[in-house]
Amino acid sequence: MPSPAPLLSLTWTDHVTGRQGFLVVDRLVRGVASGGLRMRDGCTLDEVTGLARGMTMKEALHYDPEARYIPLGGAKGGIDCDPRDPAAYGLLVRYLRAVRPYVESCWTTGEDLGLSQDLVDRAVAEVGLVSSVQAVYPLLDDETAARRRLADAFAVEVDGIGLDELAGGCGVAESVLAALDRSGVPYPATRVAVQGLGTMGGATARFLARAGLTVVAVADVKGTVANPEGLDVEALLAARDAHGTVDRAALRPGDRELPGDAWLSAEAEILVPAAASYVIDTANQDRVRARWIVEAANMPVLPEAERLLTARGVTVLPDVVVNSGTNAWWWWTLFGDIGPDAAEAFAHIRRAMRTLVDTMLARATADGTSPRTAAHALAADRLPVIAERFGWYG
């Protein structure tokens, strides 16, 4: 689909470290845009621009005219810094001070790669903002009740992991299961390799393991842990630090430590890149043995690599669909489509993601295109409908 210039694009330079931060608002709906804030060494304006455009599509793909949640526009923030750098938190605070007018008026944001929601909330409070999503409050029927509902949802834990950390992985896992069901592939015969065991990757691994799939490899910054008989996902999740790095003392005798990129060529039917962007390119795509690549991370497969993968029968399920459950869960909860209850949230996520993935794959089959092209076509169909109903700016 065509990619017009974003409505707003800015680059900020930190006066203390010289590092840069970026904010891109791709589109507004009712005056508001939605998109997370990431922090990683090497983050660029082009990257953030692409992510903001992706958020526009994710919002449009979840448009339901009967729901309380009305999709917003798309935006994204990014900071060029390693989140493990001791100076990272101060940089985050100064960035938020610089973009404060946008958070107050039009940009709703939250955790993304390299940042936890707890850290974002801490920095937001230090800056003096009400909330990272306060720009949406004027659109709510009952702000007090909505904020209490979201706070209650963030307080819910399921087997030691917060509901907010599980929502996105539930959506990724359901995308995998929908693809397997359409192809008639049984869950117990399906092996999975996951790159990244942070919020998204960890939750995805948990839901897939509990569905009966075998997780044979996971990768973090220390390398890949693999076991062809299956890893103990719960033990690995319990042994993670705040950045998703697994304490190797938790490994079992049959678990092997391999190089960091070994997950890419794992003997598995499903690959789930769930950490960094641009990890599968033309130089390494030929190492992929999987039948499906499921993009839990944003933009992990470069376009030319995807064309080569598609040509040899590897199906890429795109990020704009696969990882959209996190964003949608926030808004379903805040607007009141679901309550602060794990069972209700998981049921709603599964139902919505299953419908969206099935619609995308059916469109791809009917049009003879890739799932990504089909997803973009669905978004292109819905964006004018949203614009006609709500306008570009609100």
Image: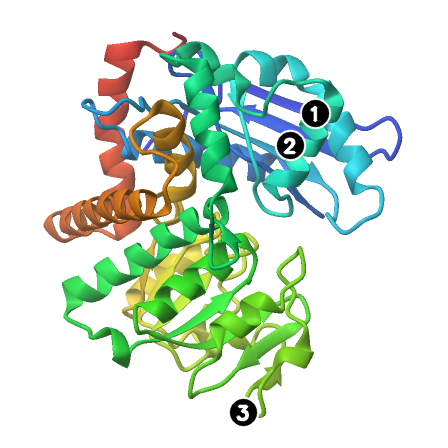
Residue farthest along the right direction in this orientation: 16
Residue at the image position 20 percent from the left and 22 percent from the top: 65
Residue at the image position 45 percent from the left and 37 percent from the top: 153
Task: Name which of mark 3 and mark 2 comes first in the sequence.
Answer: 2
Q: Is residue 138 above or below residue 14?
A: above
In the picture, the disc for residue 254 is: 3
Q: CA distance from mark 3 to mark 1?
A: 46 Å
Q: Left or right of 175: which side holds 140?
A: right
Mark 2: secondary structure: helix
Q: CA distance from mark 3 to mark 2?
A: 40 Å
Amino acid residing under circle 2: Asp
Q: CA distance from mark 2 to mark 1?
A: 6 Å
Residue farthest along the bottom direction in this orientation: 253
Mark 3: secondary structure: loop
Q: Left or right of 182: which side holds 110?
A: right
Amino acid residing under circle 1: Ala
